[in-house]
Image (cartoon, rainbow, N blue to C red):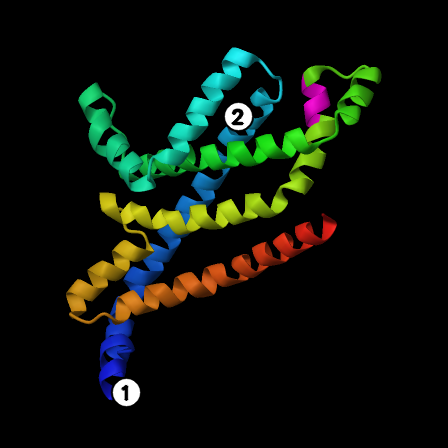
Amino acid sequence: MELFLDNFANWDSLKDAYPLLLQGLWMTILLSIAALPVGMALGLLVGVVYSFHIRWLNRILIVYIDLCRSFPIIVLLVLIFYGLPFLGLTLNAFVAVIVALGLNNSGYYGEIFRAGIQSVPKGQREAARALGLGPLQEVAYVVLPQAVRKVLAPLASNSLELIKGTSVASLVALPDLLRSARVAQEQSYNPTPLMAAAVIFFIALWPLARWVARLERQMMVRR
């Protein structure tokens, strides 16, 4: 037990690592706040455009969704951060991570929104048209509010995965929570900072995970 505490719960190492861990936590929060709306907005755009049933455009959207979902975030980040400079476009590490997370998750969000929109009864759209609403008004005022309620649980679940995915930022030396913990571990020659990072992730994400589980149960009951 003493050996375990010395290696994974060393108070002296934790005190020295505290500033780095705090800095890393703040960077992880910033990445999450920036990437979530990007991924969700792109996914919403995909879902709404798909709902107009333009055959050739829908085929392009399906290819886009498949590509975004097929590429691992790490591979996508490497292509964006290290590959784009060869084409004359250089992004800083923060923007590159946001773009990678946004593109990758937009495929998942797009599929979720598409499924939600398609689940809305056709009679609702016909009623909206009868009231004189245009296509965009029909989607914005009638279809989307109902679709979002139907897919709130998968949206929340995917958002949770996106937040966890911010740990890929360490690949481009961005000082997120994981990267900061690794730096602190190398400085102290003790794995306590890594254990502290894991605990911080759990404390921060566990309430969200429980909320997602509750939403999923409620969705099953409604069915």
Left or right, 71 with respect to 205, comes to left
Q: Decide whether residue 171 is among the magenta residues.
A: no
Residue 46 badge: 2
Amino acid type of disc 1? Met
Q: Position of residue 160 (x, y in %)?
A: 48, 50
The total number of labels drawn is 2
Label 1: element kind? loop
Q: Quadrant of residue 180?
A: bottom left
State how far apart marks 2 and 1 are (Cα). 53 Å
Q: Where is the N terminus found, in terms of image quarters?
A: bottom left
Q: Which residues are magenta?
A: 136-140
Precedes in sequence: disc 2 or disc 1: 1
Q: Residue at x 46, y 61 (%)?
A: 204
Name the residue type under label 2.
Val
Name the residue located 52 percent from the left edge and 18 percent from the top edge: 58
Which of 136 and 71 lies nearest the eye of the viewer?
Answer: 71
